[in-house]
Image (tube, rainbow, N blue to C red):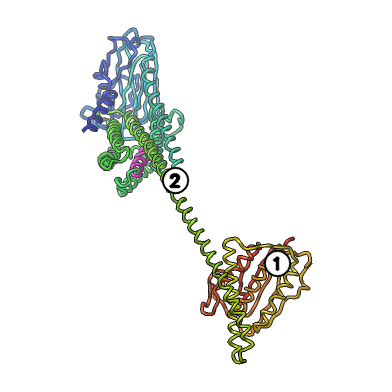
């Protein structure tokens, strides 16, 4: 109820401000009398409205006497479309002549008198006492000889007598409305200039404000790309600003005089179509759950077809559909105001209530503007800018409120995220401490296990050697087996101990410089007995091929590298084919030296090659080993700044490649 009261109050105010001005005196039977007061003595203008003499289908020369046959009277302002008959005779409503006799006060003789000639459709010539004062377009008796033109003009003249005869010839082959359907004002020069200034200032300020609002929305849309609603709101503002700038008192024709009148009318219709689509797209973006997408598609289809119709036809055709166009726009605005906004209000959406009130006001202003062009009384063409300006102002406030709301949510989310991050950091630190403690416990456990294994294994080895003296020959095999297993257990204990120290970074790492030739000689000497003792053939690359051996230095901990060589040799024997061949070689790279162990093995799986150096990984668990030796090798080589990898050049060969940096 409150909304309805506000709307009606605003509507009454707008009607009060734009109702037709009382004309004193009024034109009667083609005559008007201003002899009772001086026009130049008052600062106001008067409307020349009433019954003008009219000669249909004739272009009467001002110097000719007025023909009495087939003439009559025409209401001014009014469109020809509502006067199909003059007297009792039907006429073509395409051209004719108006005549008005004006009687002035004697004081106005010799003073400057002005006429505010509003838009007359669509070409006309105007005389005062036989003197041509204004001609817009080309008045003709056929469509080919008539050239339309439309622009508000201000005419000033100095009457030489108190009796004036105004003749206006009008032709219209261009659009639906014809004749003098806008008011003509007469008054002193000062009064006419005063009348012309407010509409000009109003339209300039309105157009400028709308364009600035549109720029504001577009900048806002560029900063917040995810929010498309402000983009459509900016387009709506700019389109309304262009409409005001192009078709108000600040006509584009003043800046582009060569622009065809036909394209001027088409441009007006196309801008209105684009504006109504931008408005509906805006509402669809802010209320997607309330604005049906099928309705939006239907509007795009209908208005798109109408836009094509406007482009492909002449104004005399598509202006006949103005009433249909008005109904479409009205139904579109009523759908938004009576369906979309009420749904949003019930859902308590931000800005829905103020938008609904401003939307209803905009509906009334659109109706007023449209009905004005349909020549319905008590309507005005200047209200549409006011209505939409109010609507855009409310939406600007809604946009700012939405931005503030988003910023508040963003700040709250940032605070919650910071609190969550702090809690997460505490949990990570707590978990890290737990993992570190667990890691240390595991390392201590491994170290203790390795330490505890050494004593019994050493005793087993010692007792095995003593028993070999007293055991018969057929029992030596079993003692050798016990000895081999004890050797394996010793190596396992050593690897466990090394792994525990590496995890705790307690490995006694003492690298020293030595020549690459010396390292290779140590490798060959250390590895050959192990390989041959396992029953395999053995070969190595000659050290004579080592280029500048004395200059190629490496920095290694020889004790730890011995562990690496032993573990790799042990693993090579584990995977090698019976009576296979094992070779050692080297390659000099740019800044490193590669030591290559190669032997003949059965084909290994890709998983085995990828996980060869993972801790506790075993390809065949039941074959022995615990997957520790190669992991220890990888860690020791890493301590030296090098890398170790395994490759399989072909299905019958495997290579362990140790890369150590050279000290150049």
Q: Nearer the viewer, residue 46 or 445?
A: 445
The residues colored magenta run: 271-285
288 lies above or below 200: below
Residue 415 belongs to the span the image colors magenta = no
- Considering the numbered disc 2 on the image, is that residue within a helix, a strand or a loop? helix
Report which quarter residue 259 is drawn in. Answer: top left
Image spot of residue 36 (x, y percent): 27, 9
Q: Main secondary structure of the magenta part?
A: helix
Image spot of residue 141 (x, y percent): 35, 31
Report which quarter residue 285 is drawn in. Answer: top left
Mark 2 and mark 1 lie on one chain; the one further toward the N terminus is 2
Image spot of residue 235 (x, y percent): 40, 38
Q: CA distance from mark 2 to mark 1?
A: 50 Å
222 lies above or below 58: below
Q: Is residue 406 left or right of residue 662?
A: left
State yes or no: discs 2 and 1 in contact (Cβ < 8 Å): no
Quadrant of the rendering where the N terminus is positioned: top left
* Residue indicated by mark 2: 418
Image spot of residue 37 (x, y percent): 29, 9
* Residue indicated by mark 1: 593
Residue 277 belongs to the span the image colors magenta = yes
Residue count near mark 2 (Cα–Cα under 10 Å), binned few <14, some 14–19, many ≥20:
few
- The answer to whether residue 508 of the structure is visible from this angle is yes
- Considering the numbered disc 1 on the image, is that residue within a helix, a strand or a loop? strand
Residue count near mark 1 (Cα–Cα under 10 Å), binned few <14, some 14–19, many ≥20:
many
């Amino acid at each position: 109820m409150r909304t309805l009261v506000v709307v009606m109050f605003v509507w009454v105010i707008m009607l009060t401000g734009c109702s037709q001005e009382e004309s004193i005196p009024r034109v009667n039977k083609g005559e008007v009398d201003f002899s009772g007061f001086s026009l130049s003595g008052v600062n106001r203008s008067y409307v020349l409205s009433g019954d003008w003499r009219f000669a249909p289908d004739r272009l009467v020369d001002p110097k000719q006497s007025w023909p009495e046959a087939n003439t009559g009277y025409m209401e001014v302002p009014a469109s020809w479309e509502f006067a199909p008959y003059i007297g009792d005779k039907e006429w073509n409503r395409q051209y004719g002549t108006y005549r008005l006799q004006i009687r002035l006060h004697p004081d106005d003789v010799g003073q400057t008198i002005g006429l505010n000639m509003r838009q007359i459709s669509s070409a006309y010539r105007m005389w005062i006492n036989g003197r041509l004062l204004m001609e817009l377009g080309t008045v003709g008796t056929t469509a080919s000889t008539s050239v339309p033109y439309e622009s508000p003009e201000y005419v000033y003249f100095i009457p030489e007598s108190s009796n004036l005869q105004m003749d206006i010839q009008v032709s219209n082959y261009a659009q639906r409305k014809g004749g003098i359907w806008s008011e003509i004002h007469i008054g002193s020069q000062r009064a006419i200039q005063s009348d012309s200034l407010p509409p000009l200032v109003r339209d300039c300020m309105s157009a400028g404000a709308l364009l600035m609002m549109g720029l504001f929305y577009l900048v806002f849309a560029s900063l917040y790309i995810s929010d498309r609603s402000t983009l459509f709101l900016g387009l709506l503002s700019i389109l309304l600003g262009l409409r005001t700038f192009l078709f108000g008192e600040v006509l584009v024709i003043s800046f582009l005089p060569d622009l065809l009148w036909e394209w001027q009318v088409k441009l007006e219709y196309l801008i209105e179509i684009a504006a109504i689509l931008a408005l509906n797209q805006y509402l669809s973006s802010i209320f997607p759950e309330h604005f049906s997408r099928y309705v939006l598609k239907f509007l795009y289809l209908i208005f798109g077809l109408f836009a094509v119709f406007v482009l492909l036809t002449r104004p005399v055709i598509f202006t006949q559909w103005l009433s249909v166009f008005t109904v479409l726009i009205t139904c579109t605005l009523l759908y938004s105001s009576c369906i979309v906004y009420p749904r949003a209000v019930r859902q308590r959406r931000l800005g829905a209530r103020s938008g609904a009130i401003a939307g209803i006001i905009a509906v009334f202003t659109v109706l007023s503007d449209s009905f004005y062009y349909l020549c319905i009384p008590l309507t005005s063409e200047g209200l549409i800018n006011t209505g939409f300006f109010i609507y855009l102002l409310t939406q600007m406030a809604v946009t700012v409120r939405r931005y503030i709301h988003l910023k508040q949510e963003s700040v709250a989310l940032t605070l919650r995220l910071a609190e969550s991050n702090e809690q997460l950091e505490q949990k990570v630190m707590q978990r890290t401490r737990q993992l570190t403690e667990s890691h240390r416990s595991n390392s201590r456990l491994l170290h203790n296990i390795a330490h505890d294994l050494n004593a019994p294994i050493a005793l087993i080895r010692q007792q095995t050697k003593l028993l070999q003296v007293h055991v018969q020959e057929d029992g030596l095999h079993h003692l050798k087996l016990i000895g081999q297993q004890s050797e394996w257990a010793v190596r396992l204990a050593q690897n466990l101990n090394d792994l525990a120290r590496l995890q705790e970074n307690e490995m006694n790492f003492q690298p020293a410089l030595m020549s690459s030739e010396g390292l290779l000689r140590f490798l060959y000497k250390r590895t050959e007995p192990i390989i041959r003792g396992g029953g395999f053939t053995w070969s190595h690359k000659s050290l004579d091929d080592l280029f500048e051996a004395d200059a190629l230095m490496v920095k290694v901990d020889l004790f730890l590298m011995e562990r690496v060589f032993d573990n790799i040799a042990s693993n090579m024997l584990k995977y090698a084919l019976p009576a296979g061949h094992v070779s050692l070689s080297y390659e000099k790279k740019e800044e490193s030296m590669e030591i290559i162990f190669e032997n003949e093995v059965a084909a290994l799986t890709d998983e085995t090659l990828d996980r060869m150096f993972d801790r506790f990984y075993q390809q065949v668990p039941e074959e022995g080993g615990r997957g520790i030796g190669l992991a220890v090798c990888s860690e020791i080589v890493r301590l030296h700044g090098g890398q170790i990898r395994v490759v399989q050049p072909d299905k019958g060969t495997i290579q362990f490649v140790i890369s150590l940096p050279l000290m150049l």
